[in-house]
């Protein structure tokens, strides 16, 4: 199982576990991917049981260790990496394994093998890999697209109004994991949340709520999204107020809305105007 690449503190005994992975880095627009793993770990709840060996998968000169130095003494050094969590519930129909970590810099094929070896040793048969990207969409949209390891899975997703991905270009670790899962006969879905480029600096709790609903429905477990929905409702009011006071933002969003209605979005068009919500809020 690549014992040197992954450090297992204890191997939990799980019921029909589902695996969900979210990564910080390239595929984490508006913090949707990492935000979802944080939400799941807190709400399910889930406890850590294993960690990646960072020497195998990360370049420290690109993702430098974080240090805590006090009065000239090194108190703590935290390298880049990732942690596995598990729910181990007694009353739920299934358990959940969650991976939260930084997208690896090195040995992607070995990384995928290490991850899925661990999953299969725990009895996992279904895998979710979460991602989010900036796109020419509106903040009122809840657009999620997918790619899957089998045609049957794609048909299930289309029945839920989730579009399939059409793309050619540089990839994230998600595709490597999907390919490895397909070779092993695991049901694997990559879900990509489409985030408005003009909302940088804000967490899109609306997309989080929609993503949580999809995961829990397909995964067959209960997940309360009321907190996410309420938070997004409040943030939505703030965003609306910001837009109403900013003619340039209004014009840009109206152009997007018209392009959407005509079906003429240009995904290659670059826009510099963004909302950094904290710039508009009064300090508490």
Image: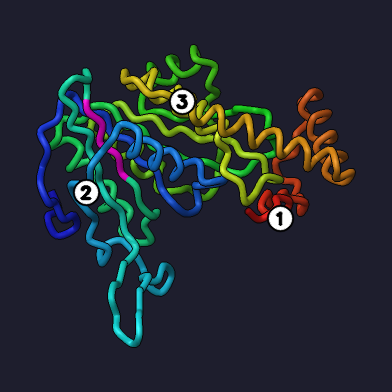
Question: Which color scheme is applied?
Answer: rainbow
Residue at position x 43%, y 38% from top?
Answer: 36
Give how far across and how far down residue 246 sits, in percent. 85, 45
Image position of 63 with respect to 193: above or below: below
Whole-percent x, y for residue 215 in the image: 40, 25
Percent position of residue 76, x then y:
28, 72
Element under disc 1:
helix
Q: Earlier in the sequence, mark 3 or mark 1?
A: 3
Residue 166: tell me if it is visible. Answer: no
Of circles 1 and 2, the one toward us is 1
State the CA–CA distance, disc 3 to disc 1: 28 Å
**Could you say which is closer to the camera, residue 272 or residue 186?**
272
- What type of secondary structure mainly makes up the magenta span? strand
Q: Which residue is mark 3?
A: 225
**Lower position in the chain sequence, tag 1 or tag 2:** 2
Q: Residues within 10 Å of mark 3 (few under 14, many from 20)?
A: some
* Residues drawn in magenta: 95-99
Residue 25's label in the rendered image is none
Q: CA distance from mark 3 to mark 2?
A: 32 Å
């Amino acid at each position: 199982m690549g014992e040197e690449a992954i450090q297992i503190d204890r191997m939990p005994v799980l019921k029909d576990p589902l695996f969900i992975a979210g990564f910080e880095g390239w595929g984490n627009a508006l913090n949707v991917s990492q935000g979802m793993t944080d939400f799941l770990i807190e709400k399910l709840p889930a406890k850590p049981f294993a960690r990646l060996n960072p020497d195998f998968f990360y370049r420290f000169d690109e993702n430098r260790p974080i240090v805590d130095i006090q009065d000239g003494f090194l108190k703590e050094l935290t390298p880049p990496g990732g942690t596995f969590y598990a729910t181990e519930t007694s009353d739920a129909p299934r358990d959940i394994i969650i991976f939260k970590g930084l997208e690896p810099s090195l040995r992607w094929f070995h990384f995928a093998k290490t991850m899925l070896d661990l999953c299969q040793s725990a009895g996992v048969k279904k895998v979710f890999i979460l991602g989010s990207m900036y796109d020419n969409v509106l903040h009122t949209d809840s657009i999620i697209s997918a790619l899957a390891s089998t045609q049957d899975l794609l048909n299930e997703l289309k029945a839920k109004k989730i579009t399939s991905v059409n793309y050619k270009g540089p990839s994230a670790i998600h595709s490597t994991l999907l390919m490895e899962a397909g070779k092993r006969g695991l049901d694997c879905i990559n879900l990509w949340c489409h985030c408005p480029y003009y909302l940088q600096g804000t967490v899109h709790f609306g997309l989080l709520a929609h993503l949580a609903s999809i995961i829990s429905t397909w995964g067959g477990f209960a997940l309360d999204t009321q907190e996410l929905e309420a938070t997004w409702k409040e943030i939505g009011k703030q965003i609306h107020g910001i837009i109403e006071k900013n003619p340039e933002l209004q014009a840009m969003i109206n152009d997007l809305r018209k392009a959407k209605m005509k079906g003429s979005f240009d995904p290659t068009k670059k826009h510099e105007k963004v909302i950094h919500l904290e710039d508009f809020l009064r300090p508490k």
